[in-house]
């Protein structure tokens, strides 16, 4: 060994003896600490990566799913935004319309068509008038005449008469079911009329008739030897046609000589509306007989039914 190399080794040994290399336990603690620091750093790095992925997913969102169009259906071209015009007024909004229906038409359910409005008739056939029940027939056929269809009510007028299309009236003679039939004295008579009004005007007649009865609670009527005081009043009524009006006229009864009988003479009048048609039954009795409510109700039902059948 050369002298320079020997001096170098001696210098290194002296320098090593001067440094404290630490005991083994201290070296192990330092190594463990460095290992824990490396593990903690790795965990933090992984957590940051996961948070970044979640945030990125929420911001970007899933890619849109494209639904293929049915076979044979053309795919509409993409709509490009209209260029704005500086200084121009905005276009008016377009109201949505139902496909296949032009604006202004009324929407209806698919496959359902609106029911046509009934046509107002222009003539009145014989079949529009009811036929008496067999038990009420006395062998006298009804006779068509030009008759007053309503009694006078303190001079009341009916403006709805100007809306009449056609009117027919007849005289009907009947008997009560419990009395003998053909060849015997009748129990009563009707003035039975049917009137067609212009569309929407028939109900005016019923309103005017109600008011006329209210405005005329009593009036003098000609009698046998002297006038008699008659009284009028509305009666509750329903169940006939579209609507109906029933009122009574009551006055002191007189015999054929004009002498008082001591009983009240009662007349019943019923007007029934069916659409634009009004049928009226004015019961006028026979030789001082009074109207029987049950009989008038039964014949009113027949009269309304006959009009309904005629109008279809």
Image (cartoon, rainbow, N blue to C red):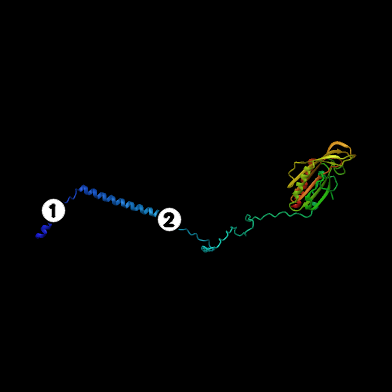
Q: Is residue 1 visible?
A: no
Residue visible at 34% across and 53% down in the picture: 46
List x then y, in percent, for residue 112: 65, 55
Above/below status of 115 relative to 86: above
> Which secondary structure lies at badge 1?
helix
* Sooner in the amino-acid sequence: mark 1 or mark 2: 1
Judge whether 57 appears above or below 302 on screen.
below
Q: Nearer the viewer, residue 80 or 108?
A: 80
Q: Position of residue 277 (x, y in %)?
A: 76, 50
| Left or right position of 80 against 9 | right
Q: Is residue 181 left or right of residue 41?
A: right
Distance from disc 1 to disc 2, alpha carbons, whole Å, reads: 66 Å
Q: 87 or 74, which is in the foreground?
A: 87
In this orientation, does residue 5 appear? yes
* Residue 100 horizontal side relative to residue 212, left or right: left
Q: Residue furthest front?
A: 87
Identify the residue at image location x=42%, y=55%: 57
Q: Is residue 222 above or below residue 195?
A: above
Numbered circle sitting on residue 50:
none
Rendered image: mark on residue 14? 1
Q: Nearer the viewer, residue 53 or 174?
A: 53
- The location of residue 276, given as percent across then percent down, is 75, 51
Q: How many marks?
A: 2
x then y, percent, for residue 17: 14, 51
State which quadrant residue 109 falls in. bottom right
* Label 2 SS: helix
Q: Residues within 10 Å of mark 1 (few under 14, many from 20)?
A: few
- Identify the residue at horizontal 33%, vertical 51% (top origin): 44
Q: Which of the numbered marks, if any, corresponds to residue 59? A: 2
């Amino acid at each position: 060994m050369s002298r320079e190399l020997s001096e170098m080794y001696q210098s290194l040994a002296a320098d090593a003896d001067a440094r404290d290399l630490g005991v083994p336990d201290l070296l192990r603690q330092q190594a463990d600490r460095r290992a824990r620091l490396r593990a903690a750093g790795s965990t933090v790095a992984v957590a940051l990566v996961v948070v970044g992925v979640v945030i990125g997913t929420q911001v970007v969102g899933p890619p849109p799913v494209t639904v293929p169009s049915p076979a044979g259906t053309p795919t509409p071209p993409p709509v490009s935004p209209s260029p704005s015009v500086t200084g121009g007024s905005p276009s008016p909004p377009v109201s949505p319309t139902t496909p296949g229906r032009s604006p202004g038409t009324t929407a209806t359910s698919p496959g359902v068509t609106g029911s046509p409005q009934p046509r107002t008739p222009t003539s009145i056939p014989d079949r529009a008038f009811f036929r008496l029940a067999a038990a009420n027939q006395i062998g006298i056929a009804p006779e068509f005449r030009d008759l007053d269809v309503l009694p006078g009510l303190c001079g009341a007028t009916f403006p709805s008469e100007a809306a009449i299309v056609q009117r027919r009236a007849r005289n009907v003679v009947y008997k009560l079911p419990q009395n003998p039939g053909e060849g015997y004295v009748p129990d009563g008579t009707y003035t039975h009329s049917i009137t067609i009004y212009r569309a929407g005007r028939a109900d005016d007649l019923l309103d005017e008739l109600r008011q006329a009865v209210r405005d005329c609670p009593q009036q003098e009527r000609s009698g046998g030897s002297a006038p008699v005081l008659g009284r009028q009043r509305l009666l509750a009524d329903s169940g006939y046609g579209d609507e109906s009006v029933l009122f009574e006229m009551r006055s002191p009864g007189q015999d054929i000589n004009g002498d008082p009988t001591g009983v009240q003479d009662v007349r019943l009048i019923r007007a029934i509306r069916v659409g634009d048609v009004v049928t009226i039954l004015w019961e006028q009795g026979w030789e001082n007989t009074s109207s029987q409510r049950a009989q008038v109700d039964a014949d009113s039902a027949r009269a309304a039914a006959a009009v309904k059948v005629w109008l279809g």
